[in-house]
């Protein structure tokens, strides 16, 4: 059994609402999940799916209605757990009267570091996130992207074993996103465990060893991005041209882009379709496997969830 | 406790950078005007006017800072979500609260000390010399600081479970009620029902007693404040603040952040 960095068991969070707080809204429902030591784990889902709720529960910012979680074997209620964990909040905001260097020094004081060590680490982190030249400017003058970088610096300042990032790419331009991706990969090379939430699926596909897909407060799948996609292989795609005004039997099912057509068929129907197309004078340009992307998998779940919610609403009426 | 100290120093730095100490300029101007006016309009009662005005200004300015900044100590951190990154460090919620309390009390101590120095300078200007009995002014300033610490603790408690506006109202309301606790204790209790008598008695001891901190008249007339009152007020503040902060910690440690 692999070493587990994060263990989540039946984690549930309900929020009371209404005038007397008698009604309850479930943000997270019986989440069971593990993150292995040394892996990059992507937590993906649409807005309001329960990603930030899970992360806030892990960081002790909110408290579970039921269930438990452990990070590096320590209960999330144990304040000492935070010594080995770094956290970047979603859309971070920091004390705007401080400079970046002052903020990092302030946070470093909560860890048992000597003054010299603090100074060295603060400078190293500022360099790492590209804020060396802006370190003496008060944070109230920082852009959203710069605040995100400061947030990342404070999360890894104390050399934590586990780094939890809530939407780390949010608000960043392509260059900034690339830099965050590089930092995540560097953390992985250093043997750290990284868990990050995102709704940018290409980032998850590019960076993650495994992903967990959460929709409507429930975990819908966990595995390597490839594994999740493989489960949903959708068939074969034929790309062809049809010179002149020829007509072909399958043309009505094909999608036209300029002079070219794309036709999706089931794997067992591939050879028959090719023969029919060739018989009609089509020039076959390529044949490729159609794999559902993580995005399609994700969208299917979202749509299924919405359909289910609509059905419940109708039945309640 | 070391971690509470780190939070306290940052809270002090925040107050300084947010120009909270600029109120000293207002106080200085007020005292200058008072010093000039006193020389022209009052004969023989300069000390009474200057000391009363100075101590009242120290008290009112301090109260405004205590109530408004005291409530903002926690609510601002929650609204702006600066608390998220901080509580993800190895710092307990009660350490955070204690640090915020200490930081604002430190700010108030510096502010009050500066105003007290200004008051003594104006007294020196008006009277041309300071006497031993003028030390009572310093005792009165110390009592104001104790009172402000108590107000900060109450503001901190209310801001842990209600909105900033309500927290300000509750704190200000409790302060005003606390000025009349002595009257509550001296009510003709025989006119009340036995149940009300017990309730009134308990309530009078439960509410903060701010009246004990008022020695303005003694200071204005240069009368010495008994040592027992200094000790009693100091102990009262320490015990009351500790109780209020413990309750605030219990409430805040169970609070879900937004």
Image (tube, coloured by chain):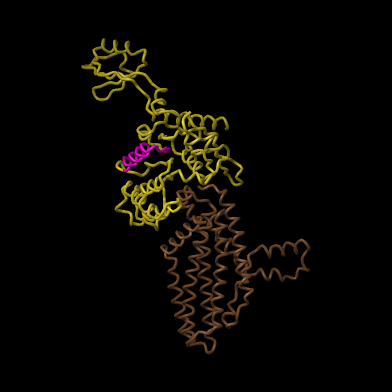
Residue B185 is left or right of residue B135, and the answer is right
Q: Which residues are magenta?
A: A176-197
Against A229, residue A184 (above or below) is below
Is A145 a magenta residue?
no
- Find chain A in the image and tell me its colour: yellow
Q: Position of residue B194 (x, y in %)?
A: 78, 63
Residue A47 is left or right of residue B174, and the answer is left
Q: Position of residue A238 (x, y in %)?
A: 30, 18
Q: Residue A65 lies in what quarter of the image?
A: top right
Residue A309 is left or right of residue B204, and the answer is left
Which sits in the foreground, B154 or B191?
A: B154
Magenta span: predominant SS is helix
Q: Position of residue B121 (x, y in %)?
A: 46, 80
Residue at point 51% right, 44% down?
A60
Against A178, residue A229 (above or below) is above
Is A190 a magenta residue?
yes
Against B131, residue B204 (above or below) is above
Q: Position of residue B44 (x, y in %)?
A: 54, 89
Among the chains pictured, the one given brown colouring is B
Residue at point 57% right, 68% down?
B147
Residue at point 44% right, 73% down?
B26
Against A247, residue B209 (above or below) is below
Which sits in the foreground, A293 or B99?
A: B99
Q: Is residue B177 visible?
A: no
């Amino acid at each position: 059994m692999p070493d587990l960095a994060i263990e989540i068991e039946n984690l549930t969070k309900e929020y009371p609402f209404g005038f007397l707080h008698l009604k309850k809204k479930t943000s997270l429902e019986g989440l069971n999940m593990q993150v292995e030591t040394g892996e990059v784990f992507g937590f993906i889902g649409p807005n309001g799916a329960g990603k930030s709720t899970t992360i806030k529960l892990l960081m002790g910012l909110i408290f579970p209605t039921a269930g438990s979680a452990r990070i590096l074997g320590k209960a999330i209620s144990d304040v000492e757990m935070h010594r080995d964990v770094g956290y970047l909040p979603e859309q971070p905001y920091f004390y705007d009267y401080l400079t970046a260097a002052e903020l990092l020094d302030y946070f470093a004081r909560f860890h048992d570091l000597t003054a010299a060590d603090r100074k060295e680490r603060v400078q190293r982190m500022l360099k790492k996130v590209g804020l060396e030249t802006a370190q003496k400017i008060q944070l109230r003058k920082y852009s959203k992207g710069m605040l995100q970088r400061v947030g990342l610096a404070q999360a890894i300042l104390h050399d934590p074993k586990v780094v939890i990032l809530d939407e780390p790419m949010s608000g960043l331009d392509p260059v900034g996103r690339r830099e965050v991706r590089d930092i995540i990969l560097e953390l992985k090379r250093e043997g750290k465990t990284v868990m990050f939430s995102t709704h940018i699926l290409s980032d998850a596909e590019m960076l993650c060893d495994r992903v967990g897909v959460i929709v409507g407060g429930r975990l819908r799948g966990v595995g390597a991005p490839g594994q999740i996609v493989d489960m949903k292989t959708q068939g074969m795609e034929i790309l062809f041209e049809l010179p002149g005004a020829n007509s072909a039997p399958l043309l009505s099912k094909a999608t036209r882009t300029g002079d070219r057509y794309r036709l999706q068929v089931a794997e067992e129907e591939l050879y028959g379709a090719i023969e029919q197309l060739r018989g009609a004078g089509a020039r076959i340009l390529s044949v490729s496997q159609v794999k559902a992307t993580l995005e399609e998998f994700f969208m299917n779940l979202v749509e299924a969830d919405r359909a289910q919610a609509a059905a419940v609403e109708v039945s309640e009426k | 406790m070391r971690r509470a100290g780190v939070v306290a120093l940052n809270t002090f730095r925040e107050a300084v950078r947010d120009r909270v100490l600029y109120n000293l300029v207002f106080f200085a101007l007020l005292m200058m005007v008072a010093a000039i006016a006193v020389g022209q309009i009052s004969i023989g009662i300069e000390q009474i006017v200057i000391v009363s005005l100075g101590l009242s200004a120290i008290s009112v300015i301090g109260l405004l800072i205590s109530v408004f900044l005291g409530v903002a100590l926690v609510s601002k951190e929650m609204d702006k979500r600066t608390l998220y990154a901080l509580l993800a460090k190895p710092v307990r919620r009660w350490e955070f609260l204690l640090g915020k309390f200490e930081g604002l009390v430190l700010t108030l101590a510096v502010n009050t000390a500066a105003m007290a120095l200004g008051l003594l300078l104006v007294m020196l200007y008006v009277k041309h010399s300071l006497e031993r009995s003028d030390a009572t002014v310093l005792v009165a300033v110390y009592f104001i600081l104790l009172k402000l610490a108590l107000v900060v603790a109450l503001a901190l408690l209310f801001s842990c479970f209600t909105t900033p506006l309500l927290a300000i109202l509750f704190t200000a309301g409790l302060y005003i009620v606390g000025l009349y606790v002595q009257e509550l204790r001296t009510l003709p209790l025989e006119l009340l029902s036995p149940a009300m008598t017990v309730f009134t008695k308990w309530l009078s001891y439960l509410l903060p007693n701010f009246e004990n901190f008022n020695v303005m008249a003694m200071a204005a007339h240069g009368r010495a404040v008994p040592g027992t009152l200094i000790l009693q007020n100091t102990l009262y503040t320490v015990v009351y603040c500790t109780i209020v902060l413990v309750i605030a910690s219990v409430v805040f440690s169970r609070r879900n952040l937004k």
